[in-house]
C-alpha cells in the first residue's frame, strides 16, 4: 500500500512538473520578440499569403490556455503535434535524434567517470591537496562549454565525446576527491596505513565499499549535467541530436518541437533526481 502511494505521489509530481514545463515554454515562446514574424513578409510574392497565415496563427495564439490545450492534445494523440518548421509529426523528428544523443552520452559518460575516478584517487592519497590535480579541473570548470567546443574545432583536435567527457570529469572530480579524502582520514584507515597495509588493498576493501552509495548517487547527477551541456556541444559540432533539434526549434520559433525536446529533458532530470535522492536516502540509512 505504501509503495503504491509512493508511486502515485511520484507520478503526480512528475505530471505537475511537466505541466509547468509546458506552460512555461508556451509563455517564453509566445511572448518572445518576433514570435509572429515571418521572413516571407519581406518578399512581395508571398507577403499576402504570409500575412494571412500569421493572422490565423495569431488568433490561435491569442490565448495561453488555447495554446497549452492544443499542445497537450498533440501529445495525448502520441504524435506530439506537428512541427511548424518541417510540417511533420514531432515524434518523427525527436525519436531518431534521441538515439543520436543517447549514443553520445553513452560514449562520454564512461570516459568522464574513468578520468574523474583516476584523478580523484591520485589527488586524495597525498597529505595535502595538490594543485597538480586541482588546477586542470578548475580550468575546465571555468571554461564555458561552447568555448571549449570551439577551441577543439579551431585546433582540429577532439570532438563532441571528448568535450562532454572533459566537462563531466571536471565536475565529478570535485565531488569524488572530497569524498575520497574524507574517507582516507577516517581513524581506522589512518591506523591501517600507519601499519603499512598496502593502499590498493585498503582502497578496494574499505574505501570504495564505504563510498559506493554516494558514487551511485553521483551517476544520475552526471546525466543531469550532461543534459545541460548537450545543446552547445551538438550545435557547434553539428551533431544531429536532441540538443541541436531544440536549438533549431528555438531559432525558428517551432513551438511543438521545442516543447517536445524540453519535456524529454525535463523527464530525464526528474528521473535522475529521483534516483539520486533514493541513493542519498539509502546511504543515510546505511550510515545510521
Image: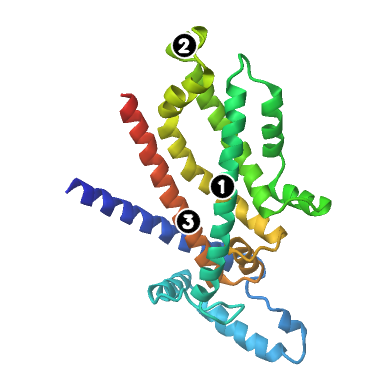
Tag 1 residue: 109
Q: Nearer the viewer, residue 65 or 104?
A: 104
Residue 248 position (above or below residue 232): below
Q: Helix, strand or loop at disc 3? A: helix
- Which class describes the residues within 10 Å of circle 3: few (<14), some (14-19), or many (20+)? some
CA gap, disc 3 to disc 1?
19 Å
Of the pair 234 and 187, the residue shown nearer to us: 187
State which tag comes first along the sequence, 2 or 1: 1
What is the x, y in percent for residue 80? 46, 73
User: At x 52% / y 25%, what residue is drawn?
Assistant: 180
Label 2, residues with CA under 10 Å away: few <14, some 14-19, many ≥20: few
Residue for badge 2: 192
| Secondary-structure class at tag 2 | helix
* Alpha-carbon span between mark 3 and mark 2: 46 Å
Q: Earlier in the sequence, mark 3 or mark 1?
A: 1
Q: Is residue 197 left or right of residue 149?
A: left
Amino acid at each position: 500500500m505504501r509503495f503504491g502511494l509512493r508511486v502515485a505521489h511520484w507520478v503526480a509530481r512528475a505530471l505537475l512538473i511537466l505541466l509547468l514545463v509546458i506552460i512555461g515554454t508556451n509563455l517564453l515562446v509566445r511572448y518572445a520578440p518576433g514570435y509572429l514574424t515571418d521572413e516571407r513578409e519581406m518578399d512581395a510574392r508571398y507577403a499576402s499569403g504570409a500575412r494571412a497565415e500569421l493572422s490565423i496563427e495569431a488568433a490561435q495564439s491569442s490565448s495561453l490556455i488555447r495554446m497549452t490545450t492544443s499542445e497537450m492534445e498533440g501529445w495525448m494523440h502520441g504524435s506530439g503535434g506537428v512541427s511548424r518548421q518541417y510540417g511533420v509529426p514531432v515524434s518523427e523528428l525527436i525519436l531518431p535524434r534521441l538515439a543520436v544523443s543517447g549514443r553520445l552520452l553513452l560514449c562520454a559518460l564512461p570516459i568522464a567517470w574513468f578520468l574523474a575516478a583516476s584523478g580523484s584517487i591520485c589527488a586524495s592519497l597525498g597529505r595535502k591537496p595538490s594543485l597538480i590535480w586541482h588546477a586542470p579541473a578548475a580550468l575546465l570548470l571555468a571554461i564555458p562549454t561552447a568555448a571549449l567546443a570551439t577551441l577543439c574545432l579551431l585546433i582540429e583536435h577532439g570532438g563532441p565525446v571528448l568535450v562532454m567527457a572533459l566537462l563531466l570529469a571536471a565536475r565529478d572530480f570535485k565531488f569524488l576527491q572530497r569524498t575520497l579524502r574524507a574517507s582516507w582520514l577516517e581513524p581506522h584507515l589512518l591506523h591501517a596505513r600507519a601499519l603499512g597495509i598496502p593502499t590498493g588493498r585498503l582502497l578496494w576493501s574499505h574505501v570504495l565499499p564505504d563510498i559506493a552509495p554516494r558514487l551511485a548517487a553521483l551517476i544520475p547527477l552526471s546525466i543531469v549535467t550532461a543534459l545541460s551541456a548537450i545543446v552547445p556541444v551538438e550545435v557547434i559540432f553539428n551533431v544531429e541530436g536532441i540538443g541541436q533539434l531544440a536549438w533549431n526549434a528555438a531559432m525558428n520559433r517551432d513551438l511543438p518541437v521545442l516543447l517536445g525536446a524540453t519535456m524529454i529533458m525535463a523527464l530525464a532530470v526528474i528521473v535522475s533526481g529521483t534516483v539520486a535522492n533514493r541513493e542519498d536516502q539509502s546511504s543515510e540509512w546505511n550510515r545510521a
